[in-house]
Image (cartoon, rainbow, N blue to C red):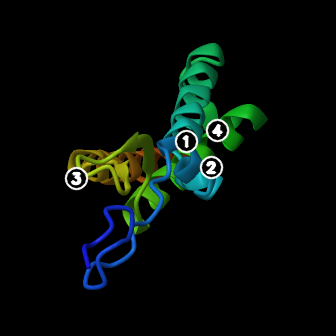
Amino acid sequence: MTLDESMPSPDLPPRRKRRSASELYRQVTPLRRQDVCSKLIVAHLVAMFAIGYVPLLFPMGILTTFGVMVVCIMALTGPIYVPQLDYRGEKLEQWERANKIAAVVILVLFIAGYGCLLYWLLFRT
């Protein structure tokens, strides 16, 4: 009796169907996607330059400022996924450590900058 090539070996686990990067990426929560995070940051930059570098004082600037802060907090609390498979082809790639360091710097600058602005607006004489 010979083994048939089409039959799987009993000691090997069954092969899982590989999913594409786009299939995996569609399953990710929108705030954990790179494209959504990038759009929020670009929207803030556009609002910042369009209204004269003080985005917190105008409604669109307030929304985009909180958007950037949400992106920073999301980057610090978990992965932000890139629509590309890792080197093994099993999982989506994620933002690197440098992105998380940049998120900390941006968040500190935002909080300090807006704290100073608020202090100046409330306590100037």
Q: Nearer the viewer, mark 4 or mark 1?
A: 1
Front one among 55 and 97: 97
Asked if the residue at tag 2 contacts the one at tag 1, i.e. Cβ–Cβ closer than 8 Å, the answer is yes
Asked if the residue at tag 3 contacts the one at tag 2, i.e. Cβ–Cβ closer than 8 Å, the answer is no
Q: Residue 44: x and y, percent?
A: 58, 31
In the displayed structure, does residue 7 sit left or right of residue 23? left
* Residue type indicated by callout 1: Ser
* Residue type indicated by callout 4: Thr
- CA gap between label 4 and label 1 equals 27 Å
SS at badge 4: helix
Q: Residue 22: x and y, percent?
A: 55, 41
- CA gap between label 4 and label 2 equals 24 Å
* Residue type indicated by callout 3: Arg
What residue sits 26% from the left and 48% below the top? 96
Q: What residue did someone put label 2 on?
A: 26
What residue sits 62% from the left and 28% below the top? 43
